[in-house]
Structure formats: C-alpha cells, structure tokens
Amino acid sequence: MPNKHITYKDTNYFSSLFCDYIDNSQNIRNLYNNRPNFEGFKNQIISKKASFKIENRLVLKNILKKQYANINISKDLEETIDLIENINTFTVTTGHQLSLFTGPLYFLYKIISTINLSEELKLKYPDFNFIPIYWMASEDHDFEEIRSFSYNAKNIIWNSDQKGEVGKFSTYNLKSTLDVFSKLLPKNINSEKIINLFKDSYLKSNNLSEATRKLVHQIFKDYSLIVLDPNEKELKKIFSSSIINELTNKLIFDNSKDSIKSLKENNYKVQVNPREINLFYLSNNYRNRIVRTHNGYSTDDKLFSWTESEIINEVNINPENFSPNVLLRPLYQESILPNLCYIGGGAEISYWLELKNCFDSIKLDFPILLNRNSVLLVRKKQIEKLHKINTTVEDLFLSQDKLLSEKVKSFADQKFDFKTQINFLEQQFKTLRDLSKLTDISFVGAVNAQEKKQVKGLKNLEKRLLKANKLKHKSFLDRIVSVQDDLFPNFSLQERSVNFTEFYCQFGDDFIKILKENIDPLNNKFTIIEL
C-alpha cells in the first residue's frame, strides 16, 4: 500500500495564505507563535503548563464524566478522562460541525491527524500526557451545511424543519433517511455494520449531539479519543469574563485589525471578517446574533433586548445562553482546554491567523496551528486504468482542460505549440516599432494593432489544431476524464464530498486502520494512498 506525497501548492487546491503558512513564509510570521514541530511543542508545553488553572481542569473532567455517563466506555478512556486533572496532561484538538454520518472524508482525516499527533508527542515527551479531542460544533445553527452526505454521487438528505442550535435537534425522524440510504448499499457484512452504526448512533439518541458522540466514539473507540460538547454552563462560566469583554470592548473586532491589515497588505484573502459583536444568543430552538443598539443590546431580530447592565447580569447568571461565533470560538476553546495545538483545514487556519492579538489582549496562549492531513484515496483498479493510459495520479491534479491539452500535446502526430512562432513574430514587430519611432512615431499605434491581430490569429490556429487533435484522440481522453471525475468529483478534492461509507463497504473496519497507519500529521504534504 504505497504512499505518494505532493506539496499543497502543487495540488492547486489550496490558498496562498495556507501554502505560505506551511512553507514558513516570513510574510505571516508575526501572526502566530510556535511552529508545528517538536521544538514548538516543547515551548508550548512550558507555556500552557504555567498558565492553565487546575480548577479549570477539574471542571472539564467533571463535565466529560457527565457527558459520557450513558456510554459504555473502556477502562482506557475512563482513565484518559481522569488524566485531565493532572498538570502534565495536555490536549490536541480538532473541531467540526455535526455533519450527518460524518459528512465528507476530511471529518475522519481531522480526527486521525489529532489522534496520531497525540501519540507522536507521547513518544517524544513521555513524561507528559496528550489527549486527542474532537470538539463538536453543537451550537452551530447552519443546518443546511450538515443535513446531507454523499454516497456514490447520490445525496442522502435529512429533512427537518427544526430551528436553533443543531446539537439539540431531535433525531426522531432519521429512520426514513436510513431507509433511503440502506437501499443504495451493496449486500455484504460491511454494509450491515454501517446500517447498525447509523441505527445505534442516530435512532437510539435523543439529539444530534448525543448521536454524534456515539458515532465518533464507536468509530474511534480503540484510540482514547475524547468527544467534547462545549455547550455547557460550567464551561461557559470559565469564559464569562471574555464574553463580557466581547460585548463591552469589541474584543475580536478591535484586536484583529492589525492582523487583518497585515494580511491585506500581503495580498491574502481575509477568511472571515469580524463583527463588532461576535456572539449569538441562545434560547429554546433559537440562536440569533447579538447587536448593539442605542439603548444597549438586542438580538438581530429584536426578539430580546438588554441594557448594558442587564446583559452583563445575564452573562453572569446564564452564561450558557451566549454562543461564540466562528472567530470567538477559538478563544473559548483555549480558555477551557489545556490545549497545545489546533488541527484544522486551510480555511480554519486562515481565520485563526487573524486572532493572535486577540489572544494576547486577554493573556491567553495562542495554540500551535497544524494543518489536518489531506488525502486522496486511489483504488487498485484506478491505478491500473491510469497505467494503461500513461497517466499518473499527480497528473490528475491539473484542471481538466489543461490535463487534456497536455496529454494531446504529448502524443499528437505533429507539434502545434506556436510559442516559437509567436516569439519570432513579436521580435519582428519590435524591430518595426523601433523603426517607426525613428521615422514617424504615429506609425507605432498601427504596428501594435497589427501585432495584436497576427498574434491573436496564431493563437486561434493553435486552439483549432488542439481541438482537432482532441477529437481525434477522444476515446483515449474520455478514459482519462473518467478516472479524474471519479477521483475529483465535481472538479473538487475527493475529501470534500465523498463519505467514508464508500470505502467502508469494501474494506470494513480495516479502512480506519489503513488511514491511521498512513496519516502522518507532521508531514506537511498532501498524501496519496493507494488502496
């Protein structure tokens, strides 16, 4: 089962900011603290150990014991939870929405990257404990993003009209979704396991948070992964001073300005623009943004309103009613966890890089940022097809039009790259331009127009020849397109759309083992796994 690796830049699927972070560009070196390497982790351990309060460890441990009370966990996981109160214990965290049946493959890659990094750190620093955490985005209210997953290019959809934070959504009506999904699966023992996993997770749970915990626990039960639902009053009480700071002092908005300015000056896209208040208010089946008003504060829909003293009092009494948005959540996470590292995708790392000054302003350790592993899974049959058409997996990362053009040029009967002719033509017109300047400057415009016309004509001829050769070799090119479409559905990375069940049906429990054995969190390259 050989692996291949290519740089993230060479995939053409990742932003310049993400690639520059991977490559340790000095353009953004001021936007974070420690690098994701063993020396960086050593520094992060020292810093976090000194700053994280023991009382917060005890709160976290008790919350986790409560959240796992109705799950039959192993002795190892029970001991792992107890380890949290030890001052030599630290966490490695990834987070994700509560995507139906894990959603796209990168959901698993995130978690496996987190598990494997925790194990590598334990080998490097045996005097310390490292616990992998999956942080459930249970307070999210964007149901549209999580309500479906793809199986063999078919969308499996959960239809529901529930509102508010998705973690509290009842899963009572998911049986009909399972019925649709079941009919698509092949008839084998692995499919039966998938159906039972769905039933045990969703149909035997009260809400989506509970279901997701069971699902993730069952998939990764052998690896001491902890699943945390952060939507807890006692945890938010730890963060209450920062909630008040956000409300009264624009914690995120004001302190991210310099980082955002730096990103823009270096021509990077700003991933998330902060609001003046980056908080939502929670109530029964309700989550709505908090805004400033002339009299104090209200929800964006005006359903709730407060004076400043009233909202501060509400935070102190009911901190669970306040929900951080995507930019404030990182500060919440790092306030309640003894965390060393956050593992996320390119978009996540991009918005974390806006936040270092926000962390500094409240004297909170900024964690190490590590890109989750990105993976392309290629079956043996697909490899065999590629060999027959003289194409590599790496070739398939090109855009389809460029890939086909390159292939046509490689085996065409005649050469039709007109670069030499165009260069010669441009040189001739340069001579004409120089002559015009010496004789009559008014002719320069006419020379330029004629050059543009003739260069355009040559390029059109080149396109026509390319098109003709594509038609001539259509059967061959169609085979290339077929494999590329399989591995890059909808012209996107496989990991962003395909669900793990497509591979589990074939490999069963070995699929998770295959991923775990082949994912190296500190290898900063895109991984191609041949199955």
Image (cartoon, rainbow, N blue to C red):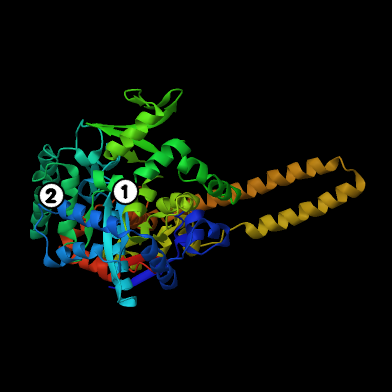
Residue 243 percent across, percent down from the top left: 38, 41
Taking the image as shown, residue 150 lies to the left or right of residue 265, namely left
Q: Is residue 375 visible?
A: yes
Crowd rating for badge 2 (residues with CA inside 10 Å; few <14, some 14–19, many 20+): many
Work out whether residue 87 or residue 196 is closer to the camera in this orientation and state it.
87
Kind of residue at badge 1: Ile
Work out whether residue 289 or residue 469 is closer to the camera in this orientation and state it.
289
Residue 1, quarter of picture: bottom left
State the CA–CA distance, disc 2 to disc 1: 31 Å
Q: Quadrant of the C terminus?
A: bottom left
Nearer mark to the viewer, of 2 and 1: 1
Taking the image as shown, residue 139 lies to the left or right of residue 509, namely right
Residue 78 percent across, percent down from the top left: 15, 63
User: Going 19% across and 38% down the picture, which residue do you hit?
Assistant: 169
Secondary structure category for the residue under label 2: helix
Kind of residue at badge 2: Ser
The outermost residue toward the right is: 439
Residue 220, quarter of picture: bottom left
Taking the image as shown, residue 294 lies to the left or right of residue 2, namely right
Secondary structure category for the residue under label 1: helix
Crowd rating for badge 1 (residues with CA inside 10 Å; few <14, some 14–19, many 20+): some
Residue position for label 1: 238
Residue position for label 2: 201
Q: Is residue 215 above or below residue 273?
A: below
Residue 26 percent across, percent down from the top left: 57, 62
User: Going 51% across and 64% down the picture, which residue do you hit?
Assistant: 24
User: Going 38% across and 44% down the picture, which residue do you hit?
Assistant: 241
Q: Is residue 144 visible?
A: no
Taking the image as shown, residue 92 lies to the left or right of residue 185, namely right
Q: Is residue 182 above or below residue 2?
A: above
